[in-house]
Amino acid sequence: MAKNTGASKFRKVDVDQYDDDKFVEENEADEAGPQGASDAEVNNLLAQGKNLDALKLILNSAPVGSKNQGVKDRAASTAVRVLQSFKSAEVEKAVKSLDAKGVDVLMKYIYRGFETPTDNSSAALLTWHEKAFAVGGLGSIVRVLTDRKRV
């Protein structure tokens, strides 16, 4: 049988630190976070016909770590506007020019665009989703849907 020794040395783990009410995300100290691409810069690239450069700009400056919902909303609407500026023949070439991280951020913006559809955005986003899925595969979709950091 077991002895009751009264020793508490076996209790090394503080289970209260894992309480959901007390959970603090690691990046919470970084409140500033990225602000996303400026509208003026994106508009300038789109006016010059440099759609691919505008796409890479919004993907590289995505406010993934930001806590400010207004910044994320503005960046998402800018991203959808950039995605709609592409002709359907240019989409595949643009997606193939992205790296794996870029494809994942693109998928985040595509799903964010599906949440708040605008005029004719769904058709363009479905085209982008098809091409991004062909490049990123199922893994890209799983990474985007399970990632807690949203755009």
Image (tube, rainbow, N blue to C red):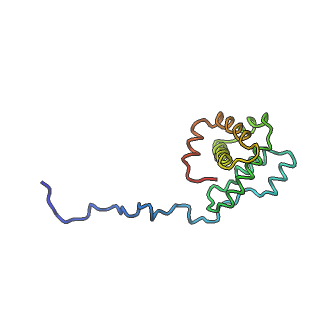
Q: Is residue 145 above or below residue 75?
A: above
Furthest toward the left, the residue is 1
Residue at image position (87%, 49%) is 47
Query: Residue 144: where, in percent of width, then height?
Result: 59, 45
Going by the picture, which residue comes out furthest to the right? 48
Instruction: Locate the N terminus and report the quarter of the image it occupies.
Output: bottom left
Q: Nearer the viewer, residue 9 or 145?
A: 145
> Residue 124 appears at what percent x and percent y?
74, 40
Residue 62's place in the image compared with 22, above or below, is: above
The residue at the point 69 percent across, 35 percent down is 131
How many numbered tags mark residues here? 0
Residue visible at 76% across and 42% down in the picture = 120
Of 124 and 90, which appears nearest the observer?
124
Where residue 67 sits, quadrant-wise, is bottom right
Q: Is residue 27 left or right of residue 35?
A: left
Q: Give the answer, above or below, for where 82 lies relative to 130.
A: below
Quarter of the image for residue 126 reads top right
Image spot of residue 33 (x, y percent): 64, 62
Image x and y of residue 70, in percent: 68, 61
